Image: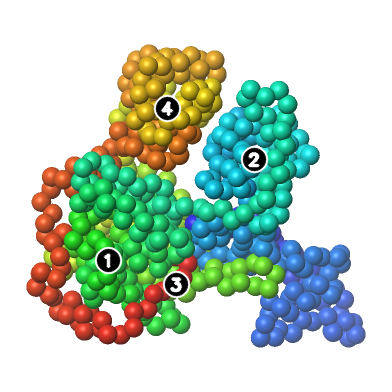
Amino acid sequence: MQYNNRKKDIIYPIALAVVLGAGIWLGLFINQKPERSSLTVYPRADKLSSILSYIENQYVDTVSMENLVESTIPTMLKHLDPHSVYIPASDLQTVNEPLDGGFDGIGVTFNMPNDTVVIISTIVGGPSERVGLQPGDRIITINDSLVAGVSFNQNNIVTMLKGPTGTKVTVGILRQGLNEIVNFEITRDKIPIYSVDVSFMLNQEVGYIKISRFARTTYSEFIEAIDKLQEQGMKKIIIDLRNNNGGYLDAATNIANEFLPEGKLIVYTQGKARPRQNVYSNARGRCIDTPVAIIIDEFSASASEILAGALQDNDRGIVTGRRSFGKGLVQEQVLFSDGSALRLTIARYYTPTGRSIQKPYEPGSDEYFYDISNRYLHGEFQERDSIYLADSLKFTTPAGRTVYGGGGIMPDFFIPLDTTGATTYLNQVARRNLIYRFAFSFADRHRKNMAEMKSHIEIENYLAGKNILDLFVDYARQRNVEPNYADIEKSKLIIETQIKAYVARILIDNQGFFPIYTKIDNTLLKTIDILEKEDLTHLFSSANDRPKSLMEIQLAMAKNQVTKDIIALGA
């Protein structure tokens, strides 16, 4: 997760410093009376504090020193690396919540079609469900403030509903079938944020787990998912890390440990003030002999790359998809007394073969953040051959496979971005978010008939008789997207599948969405095919059965040293 510094945070302090410096210089030369010599600022060891103190005491107008300091810190960090960031106290809770695995609130997910808050779902056992709130309820008031039909900002709605555990909030609800607003007093509580989005069996042998981030609770969620899938007969597994931009390092190393025999190096970190720290496997994993594939893309970063790199470098699994982001820097978070925090890069991490996957960056330049779009324009999303891999960054795994450092994890099996079914019509409806909006409207109107459905199969069977494509085309036409029937025919599978998947998500969350969406997920479908048909026995047989290399022997000898779980922010 990246908390971006903004350009105005850079320009303002620099401009202020230039103006002040020029003013001081002119003042000294225009007014050269001896008694004015005391205005000279003599540099101390802490020049920054001297300047701030001088501004506070002598500047012509009253200045908010707090605001000045707050705007100066991001500028300093900007000239270090792209991932060292300052987080103001007002933002820290929001930034940390996804990694902490929870927040304080009422436990609902909602949407705002037509300027009205509509509850999509309530957290099972959460505060809202306990008082009787239901999917489809409209929130009209929050603590006597009207929030329906008045273009209320969605972020403000979230702020009003969230609050410390034990505090109360009253919401006025309009429910279908009732002609009056009913008030519900809700006592806020701790609401979990799950980082394992979904886990289910893709077929009789292959299990699937999608991880959206590496939070404090990710490892325990992962183990729960593994246990469930193994009870259902899982023999192979696919871990989907697409769009997972990182999180806690130890969450990734603990998951890697589930697949590795004893004494295998998972990752090591090293920095100027941080001696090398190694993390080894301990042979206590549940999946040491389970064939595994990791799916990555250009938004898989940090802890995602640690997990993918650990299995790839140990010849323990395959990596499919597209080249990952390329973040090999480790941040440590320091809290200040005012509630703000600094995430400072304190080390680099290295995969077991010794490769750093941090992509190049120029301190102070914004080009780093345009890298993904540059990759797309360069054709990297479509052709592996468009990616330049320097021989100087070539590394070899114990089994003799070639892997590369210097800019992300390169998958063993490159799968290009799927453009099948892409048309001008699809682009028009997608840009206006009409597919989701139609799905929400349809689910809302048919909620009573679908309320008891608990599986995606039931939902698909219900939708099969509703001619949803024609209904959608009419819906889009009413919103100024005229039908192009040639395009619609070409994009038919995508549109219908997305509608079904969104309806299922609205009704039964991700357990409904992903099993349906799988049908048009080309990267996942090809990964299943590779896992089932390719001869990958040299990767999936227990490493204890293979002759040990010198490196492996050395690592095994080190098993008696205390394993150091590096708990740092790798986001």
Q: CA distance from mark 4 to mark 3?
A: 41 Å
Sequence order check, earlier mark of 3 and 2: 2
- How dense is the environment of label 2, judged by Cα within 10 Å: few (below 14), some, or many (20 and up)? some
Identify the residue at horizontal 37%, vertical 43% (top origin). Answer: 376
Q: Which residue is mark 3?
A: 567
Q: Nearer the viewer, mark 1 or mark 4?
A: 1
- Left or right of 170? Residue 158 is left
Distance Cα–Cα, label 4 vs label 2: 24 Å
Q: Earlier in the sequence, mark 4 or mark 3?
A: 4
Query: Is the C-beta separation of discs 4 and 3 under 8 Å?
Result: no
- Residue beneath label 2, please? 154
The image quarter containing residue 319 is bottom left
Q: Give the amino acid type for the residue marked by disc 3 in the picture.
A: Ile
Q: Nearer the viewer, mark 1 or mark 2?
A: 1
Mark closer to the chain start, 4 or 2:
2
What residue is pinned by disc 1? Answer: 285
- Which of the two discs, 1 and 4, labels the residue nearer the N terminus? 1
- The three-letter code of the residue at mark 4 reads Ile
Residue under label 4: 499
Give neighbour class at mark 1: few <14, some 14-19, many 20+ (Cα, 10 Å): some
- The residue sitting at 84% across, 75% down in the picture is 57
The crowding category of the residue bearing disc 4, from other C-alpha atoms within 10 Å (few below 14, some 14 to 19, many at least 20), is: many
Q: Which three-letter amino acid code belongs to the residue tagged 1? A: Gly
Q: Residue at x 62, y 32 (%)?
A: 137
Amino acid identity at mark 2: Gln
Measure how far apart labels 3 and 2 are at the Cα level. 34 Å
Q: Position of residue 469 (x, y in %)?
A: 40, 18
Secondary structure category for the residue under label 2 = helix
Q: Quadrant of residue 487?
A: top left
* Label 3 to label 1: alpha-carbon separation: 20 Å
Give the spatial CA distance, label 1 vs label 4: 39 Å
Asked if labels 2 and 3 touch by Cβ distance under 8 angstroms, the answer is no
